[in-house]
Image: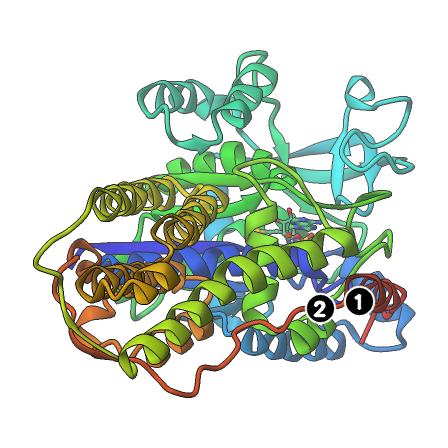
């Protein structure tokens, strides 16, 4: 079985997770379910990035020790991932010994090799980003990444010799044009950082102590990004007694990250790996941000909406549907209450829910809930639908394979619309009146077959809806698999439920928008 190692970023426990953080994780879990359905042995890693000055400050602000704080946050994170049914295989925390021990060792080894050397650092430091900038990198004297105040700081530091590996990385980029997705992000990294020449990177701090200590120089703490990035291999047991997972799953097939952290993943991480003589990840995908009307949704700004109230009121599937559909490949997407209610009512309730309900209603009314098998004769309209449906499957797979999840969803909904249109075109109620029983049966067969396919196609991100659909149609197990999408004539003795259940109950637009606006006022930034 081919393997597929997939990771999310490890999150800072600096505030309660909002739907932006939930998005990355839901995206990864969707890709995992898809890959599994396609026969891959998938291993998915997520976790928490628990060190650094920012976390230390947040803990202090709450009157807790950093360890107490991160322990609580890790529990919260796991609760949320369980509510969202995230199918991760491991949850790594950078404060765990299995991680810290190896970070110490890696740092030591890189020092021994001469890749890390001691010097002095002076620069402009952005605390929220935990990053130093040179004078020229600042934008209007502020942090080029987050736009906040920076402070001039000087400290004795260890540096990583990036220059030594820069040419190898340039060659790697050239030899592997799909290494960074989307291409525009790759070009940015290439043109803005690699081409002008990489600066050596400061990889230790003395200004705070919440982190992994440098083994041979204990007043230095390992730079939080060197610490954090290595999670992708420490979780697999790199340099530990049992490194069987490392042997099995490394290199990663896909690192999913937000566009704000692609620089760390696309430049520093591959170079650290080169220095450790390890193969580089196959692909890194940088997604866009979930925006609010006033800019990026972020823990520090507080303009957030949390996943929990949305899931509680509208269900997990509707929540995942919205966030995954709204975010086009590599682009930003916007959360608005209006948009959410509209998608719920139109896409889920009208388009998908009604298609299922109408179909089940008609089969019950016209045939007592039963139809036997693939019709002996098919009409032009049937053929057209079948072709459209076959093509939709191809498109959806192509989009999933290239991680264009939003497009995969759109393609699926095109099939939903096309199937709805087929009902209008074939007008089953007329066929019934005119007693064209064989034709009517054929139409019902095609409807069930396409609903079956749609249910399978949405399964990676809407598991419950998918199962409800397949159950109401009484589809046998062997025709619920991804492979069975290729079939179109295998259904026999279909017996649909006589108690159809509504998939999504229509929302009253205006009052519902108000409900979501209330949820957005829930400014509970910490636990
Ligand atoms: N700890 C680092 C990652 C280390 S990975 C070795 C970090 N943590 S974070 O908590 O600040 O962000 C984690 C991820 O959430 C990032 O990929 C970031 O892009 C993503 N998001 C944070 N806000 C987001 C939105 N509003 N929308 C989409 N994703 C967002 O960075």
Q: Position of residue 124 (x, y in %)?
A: 83, 31
Q: Position of residue 512 (x, y in %)?
A: 80, 67
Q: Position of residue 362 (x, y in %)?
A: 37, 72
Residue, far top: 196
Given residues 281 and 182, the one toward you in this image is 182
Given residues 82 and 392, the one toward you in this image is 392
Residue 18, placed above or below residue 290: below
Q: Residue at x 36, y 59 (%)?
A: 430
Residue 86, placed above or below residue 250: below
Given residues 493 and 179, the one toward you in this image is 493
51 left or right of 361?
right
Query: Do tag 1 and tag 2 residues touch (Cβ < 8 Å)?
Result: yes
Q: Residues within 10 Å of mark 2 (few under 14, many from 20)?
A: some
Q: Earlier in the sequence, mark 1 or mark 2?
A: 2
**Residue tagged 1:** 512
Residue, far left: 376
**Residue tagged 2:** 507
């Amino acid at each position: 079985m081919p393997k597929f190692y997939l990771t999310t970023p490890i999150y800072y426990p600096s505030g309660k997770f909002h739907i932006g953080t939930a998005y990355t994780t839901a995206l990864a879990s969707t890709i995992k379910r898809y890959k599994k359905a396609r026969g891959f042995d998938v291993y998915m890693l997520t976790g928490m990035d628990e060190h650094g000055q920012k976390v230390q400050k947040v803990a202090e602000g709450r009157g807790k020790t950093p360890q107490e704080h991160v322990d609580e946050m890790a529990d919260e994170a796991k609760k949320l991932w369980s509510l969202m049914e995230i199918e991760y295989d491991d949850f790594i925390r950078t404060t765990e010994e299995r991680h810290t021990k190896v970070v110490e060792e890696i740092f030591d080894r890189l020092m021994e090799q001469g890749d890390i050397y001691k010097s002095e650092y002076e620069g402009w430091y952005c605390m929220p980003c935990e990053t130093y900038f040179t004078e020229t990198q600042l934008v209007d004297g502020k942090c080029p990444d987050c736009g906040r105040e920076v402070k001039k700081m000087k400290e004795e530091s260890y540096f990583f010799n990036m220059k030594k590996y820069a040419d190898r990385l340039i060659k790697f980029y050239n030899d592997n044009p799909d290494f960074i997705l989307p291409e525009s992000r790759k070009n940015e990294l290439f043109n803005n950082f690699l081409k002008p020449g990489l600066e050596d990177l400061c990889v230790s701090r003395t200004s705070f102590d919440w982190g992994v200590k440098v083994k041979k120089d204990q007043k230095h703490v390992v730079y939080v990004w060197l610490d954090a990035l290595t999670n992708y291999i420490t979780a697999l047991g790199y340099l530990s007694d049992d490194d069987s997972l490392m042997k099995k799953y490394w290199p990663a097939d896909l690192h999913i990250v937000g566009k704000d952290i692609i620089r760390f993943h696309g430049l520093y991480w591959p170079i650290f790996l080169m220095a450790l003589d390890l193969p580089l990840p196959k692909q890194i995908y940088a997604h866009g941000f979930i925006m609010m009307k006033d800019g990026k949704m972020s823990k520090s700004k507080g303009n957030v909406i949390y996943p929990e109230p949305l899931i509680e009121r509208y269900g997990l599937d509707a929540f995942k549907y919205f966030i995954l559909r709204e975010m086009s490949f590599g682009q930003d997407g916007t959360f608005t209450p209006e948009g959410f209610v509209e998608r719920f009512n139109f896409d889920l309730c009208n388009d998908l829910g009604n298609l299922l309900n109408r179909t089940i209603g008609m089969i019950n009314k016209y045939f007592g809930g039963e139809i036997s098998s693939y019709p002996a004769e098919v009409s032009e309209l049937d053929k057209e639908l079948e072709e459209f449906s076959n093509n939709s499957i191809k498109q959806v797979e192509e989009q999933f394979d290239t991680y264009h999840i939003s497009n995969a969803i759109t393609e699926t909904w095109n099939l939903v619309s096309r199937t709805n249109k087929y009902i209008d075109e074939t007008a089953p109620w007329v066929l019934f009146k005119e007693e064209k029983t064989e034709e009517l049966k054929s139409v019902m067969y095609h409807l069930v077959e396409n609903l079956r396919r749609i249910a399978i196609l949405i399964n990676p991100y809407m598991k419950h809806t998918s199962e409800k659909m397949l159950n109401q149609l009484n589809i046998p197990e062997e025709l619920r698999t991804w492979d069975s999408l290729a079939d179109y004539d295998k259904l026999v003795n279909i017996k649909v439920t006589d108690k159809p259940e509504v998939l999504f109950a229509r929302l009253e637009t205006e009052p519902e928008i108000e409900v979501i606006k209330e949820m957005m006022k829930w400014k509970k930034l910490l636990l």
